[in-house]
Image (tube, rainbow, N blue to C red):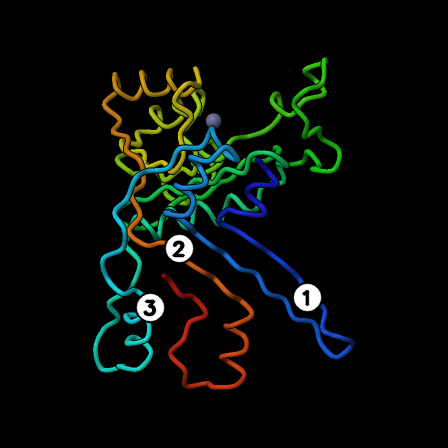
Amino acid sequence: MANYLQRQSSWTCGMNMASGAKTRVECRLLIRTFEMIAMARSSECPSVAFPMAPEPTSPEMDLAFRSRTNVSSKRSDYISWDEYFMSVALLASQRSKDPVTQVGAAIVTDKVIVGVGYNGMPRGCDDDDMPWGKTAEDPLENKYLYVCHAEMNAILNKNSESVRGSTIYCTLFPCCSCAKYIIQAGINRVVYLKDKPNNKEMIAAKLMFEKSGVQYSQFAPTKRKLVLDFGKLSIDISTSPSTTSSGLSSV
Ligand SMILES: [Zn+2]
């Protein structure tokens, strides 16, 4: 799965060293939806389920072109709130050191992000000293007893007094432990990207959500992908200060 994600999925990062003269750092963030649906259904990644979403009906590239040339009216190809917040959760997931599962979460109150988290070791526990495997005979040598999940970190790292009544965007359906945190924190809506329908922890989480009145729904993107290109952004800035290009495009 790690290789699959690195090679095929939403995110690719690379550092290209130009011959002696300069260093070009390009990091591309690709949020794919339709392509991932197809891949999720292939034998390469059979356990991942993505939401079905309609094929784009608008010529996204034309809209992007119009947004660059017509600067007298507002852009029409901007991302939705859900796409924005799920993108933040996905971006956070790329901070994770976990070699198998990278999860991100973002908590939103009144369209304002008040907490972000990803799965990682507790503060003070050096990433290089802690175990990241999951198959050792001794549970103390596996990651599970140590890793803090994304949802828990997002809640504990909140920058508001309360997250009561908020929505949490998760790249993976919360486990039963995080579901308890979500419920007890007063979060009343969960938007998730991926699910593992047969996972007992997630089944238990859904049961608790339903009994507690926490709504949950799968993310339904409208764009095929979203690209963050730091390299393009830096080139645009250096060569054409008046350009309207942001280094981010969607198709
Ligand atoms: Zn969890």
In the picture as drawn, the residue positioned furthest to the right comes out as: 20
Question: Residue 244, image x and y in percent?
Answer: 38, 79
Reply above or below: 124 against 214: below
Q: Amino acid at mark 1?
A: Asn
Label located before the other in sequence (1 or 3): 1
Total tally of numbered discs in the picture:
3
Q: CA distance from mark 2 to mark 3?
A: 12 Å
Question: Residue 56, image x and y in percent?
Answer: 27, 55
Residue tagged by mark 2?
225
Question: Residue 176, image x and y in percent?
Answer: 42, 20
As drawn, is 205 to the left or to the right of 97?
A: left
Residue tagged by mark 1?
16
Q: CA distance from mark 1 to mark 2?
A: 23 Å
Question: Residue 160, image x and y in percent?
Answer: 37, 43
The quarter of the rendered structure image containing the N terminus is: top right
Q: Amino acid at mark 3?
A: Met
Label located before the other in sequence (2 or 3): 3
The quarter of the rendered structure image containing the C terminus is: bottom left
State if disc 2 and disc 1 touch (CB < 8 Å). Answer: no
Label located before the other in sequence (1 or 2): 1
Residue drawn 48% across the image and 49% down it = 10
Q: CA distance from mark 1 to mark 3?
A: 27 Å
**Image quadrant assignment for residue 161:** top left
Reply above or below: 100 against 240: above
**Image quadrant assignment for residue 211:** top left
As drawn, is 5 to the left or to the right of 33?
A: right
Residue tagged by mark 3?
61
Q: Amino acid at mark 2?
A: Lys
Which element carries disc 2, helix, strand or loop?
loop
Residue drawn 46% across the image and 85% down it = 241
Which element carries disc 3, helix, strand or loop?
helix
**Image quadrant assignment for residue 192:** top left
